[in-house]
Image: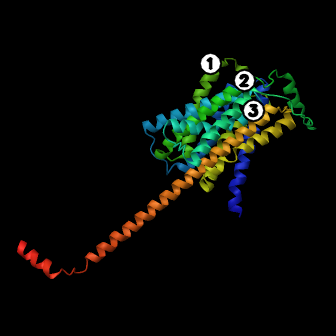
Amino acid sequence: MLGDIMPGLAMVLVQVGFAGMNITSKLAMESGMKPLVLVAYRQIFSVIATAPFAFFMERKTRPRITMPILFQLFLCSITGATANQVFYFLGLEYSTPTIACALNNLLPAVTFVLAALCRLENVGIRTAAGQAKVIGTIVCVGGSMLLSFYHGHLIDIKESSIHWQYAENMNDSSSNNGTNFLGPFLVMASCVAWAAWFIIQARLGKKFQAPYTTTTVMCFMSSIECTAIAFISEHTISAWSLRSSIRLIASLYAGIVCNALAFCLTTWSIEKKGPLYASVFSPLLLVIVAVVSWALLHDKLFIGTLVGSVLIVAGLYAVLWGTDKEAKQLKTVDEMETKQGDQKDDLELQVEKNHDYPIKIPQKLDRSCAVLK
């Protein structure tokens, strides 16, 4: 019983960790920290956190790193770490944590589209699973467009009684109202980059099975890339200062909790329950962030945000249902082929055994053979 519950608890903890990252990162940016600098620090701290795991846990089992493997790791760093996180944190700066988390649920749908274009995923439009994936993708995209372009009336919810003075001061000093389309657009761009990483990582994982080393090398490359991008944008030393407590907390939290810890827990959950089980928990992040943003940051909820979020989550589960149904069908086919192969092997073995015994040749056939000789 405990073994069945632990993977679920681990994934809930991961979503809580990501929710905290959205809140602390938003506060750090509202205190004046630039998102590109925050991303650079995140990669640096994540390398420091994951390097010991790669060294001690995979030093005996790590495959040889060849030039093609290194090139694929470079592509992973460009898509999965640099582009994904740069676009996401820039989008978070120009939107709200709730909107950013809602749009982040587009990831399975975007991954399905890219995989279909690369011929890594079978659409199967004539099957129920294929139709569910296509319809779910359309619903996800429709929900994201609604959430981005339409706000509607303000939902009258009682204001939170929690007064965090620091957060209130940050909100008062911030000029961002979360209605700019640039923020949602950048978050959607981060989903495309993250989906591209899934495609590249899927091919890399078949040749190089060392997840901790992969993460460390990828984050190391990304730390160089992100630091270079941030330094071009921010020359002043004050922009890189971590004297502010919220800046230091946000950088350490994003690197250690959301890269090192979250990766370890997610990998363990996937090994126990599979990737689909781990991905089902992603909409929980939206709920946690919406509640925490309302309680601590006093974010306002609009009709468009609510309806768009519901459509995105509904489309997400449609895509996941179709993927799960196809996986079960493929598993059934593989089991049938394996069973047929075993039966064929048994039949061939039986024939070979029968050949070991003397075969009684009919008398007429024996005489014919003598004539031919």
Q: Amino acid at mark 1?
A: Ile
Q: Position of residue 243 (x, y in %)?
A: 77, 28
Q: Is residue 48 visible from the viewing direction of this image?
A: no
Q: Is residue 65 left or right of residue 187?
A: left
Mark 1 or mark 3, earlier in chain: 3
User: At numbered mark 1, what does the secondary structure look like: helix, strand or loop?
Assistant: helix
Q: Nearer the viewer, mark 1 or mark 2?
A: 2
Q: Are marks 3 and 2 in contact (CB under 8 Å)?
A: no
Structural distance between the alpha carbons of marks 1 and 3 = 29 Å
Image point 85% across, 22% down: which residue? 173
Q: Position of residue 103 (x, y in %)?
A: 70, 34
| Quadrant the N terminus occupies | bottom right
User: At numbered mark 2, what does the secondary structure look like: helix, strand or loop?
Assistant: loop
How crowded pointer 1 is (Cα within 10 Å; few <14, some 14-19, many 20+) is rated as: few
Q: Amino acid at mark 3?
A: Ile
Q: Position of residue 320 (x, y in %)?
A: 63, 46
Image point 37% across, 67% down: which residue? 345
Q: Is residue 99 visible from the viewing direction of this image?
A: yes
Structural distance between the alpha carbons of marks 3 and 2 = 11 Å
When the figure is inspected, residue 353 is found, relative to residue 178, above or below; the finding is below
Residue highlighted by disc 3: 99
Q: Which mark is residue 232?
A: 1
- Taking depth in this image into account, of 16 and 303 the one nearest to the observer is 303
Q: Is residue 34 left or right of residue 109?
A: right
Query: Within the image, what quadrant is residue 216 found in?
Result: top right
Q: Which mark is residue 181?
A: 2
Structural distance between the alpha carbons of marks 1 and 2 = 25 Å
Q: Position of residue 138 (x, y in %)?
A: 64, 36
Query: Within the image, what quadrant is residue 81 found in?
Result: top right
| Quadrant the C terminus occupies | bottom left
Q: Is residue 80 left or right of residue 90?
A: left
How crowded pointer 3 is (Cα within 10 Å; few <14, some 14-19, many 20+) is rated as: many
